[in-house]
Amino acid sequence: MPGAESGLGPQLAGEKITVNSRTVSVVKQLGEGGFSFVYLVKDLSDPSAAGSAASEGLAHLAQSHQPSFMVLKITSIHSRQQRDVAEKEAKLLSRLSHPSIVRMIDACY
């Protein structure tokens, strides 16, 4: 179970996390798998300072004055093989576009 030693799991609710240049607040845990946790998060990034969002094709986030909610997946990676699988999944998700599939915004390793 990935959360026991890392502080992941439902206790992460209410915490602020910075991922790349975006700061989010964890609202609640949505689920967990064999080596990852999925959370509902609220984007705390300042929309007026989101010049990078527009350059990444995320202009709608910069223009909206309502809080943006997103899904954050935190993966516990302990080997090169697990990292390769996570990178492959991220690349695949970045190419998918469908109303029933969550749109991938960013990834970091």
Image: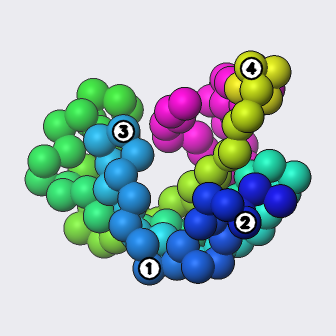
Q: Residue at x 29, y 41 (%)?
A: 21
Q: Nearer the viewer, residue 42 or 82?
A: 82
Confirm or deny contact between disc 2 and disc 3 (CB under 8 A).
no
Magenta run includes residue 7 = no
Q: Is residue 57 left or right of residue 53?
A: right
Query: Tag 2: Cα neighbours inside 10 Å, few (<14), some, or many (≥20)?
Result: few
Which span of residues is magenta-colored? Answer: 84-109
First reached walking from the N terminus: tag 3 or tag 4: 3
First reached walking from the N terminus: tag 4 or tag 1: 1
Question: Which one is closest to the eye, mark 2 or mark 3?
Answer: 2
Position above or below: 41 against 23: below
Confirm or deny contact between disc 3 and disc 4 (CB under 8 A).
no
Element on which disc 2 rests: helix
Query: Tag 4: Cα neighbours inside 10 Å, few (<14), some, or many (≥20)?
Result: few
Image coordinates for residue 38, horizontal then vertical, percent: 68, 60
Distance CA(mark 4)–CA(mark 1)? 31 Å
Element on which disc 4 rests: helix
Residue tagged 4: 80
First reached walking from the N terminus: tag 3 or tag 1: 1
Residue tagged 2: 4
Q: Quadrant of residue 85?
A: top right
Distance CA(mark 3)–CA(mark 1)? 19 Å
Distance CA(mark 4)–CA(mark 2)? 21 Å
Which mark, by number, is residue 20? 3
Residue tagged 1: 14
Question: Which one is closest to the eye, mark 3 or mark 4?
Answer: 4
Distance CA(mark 2)–CA(mark 1)? 18 Å
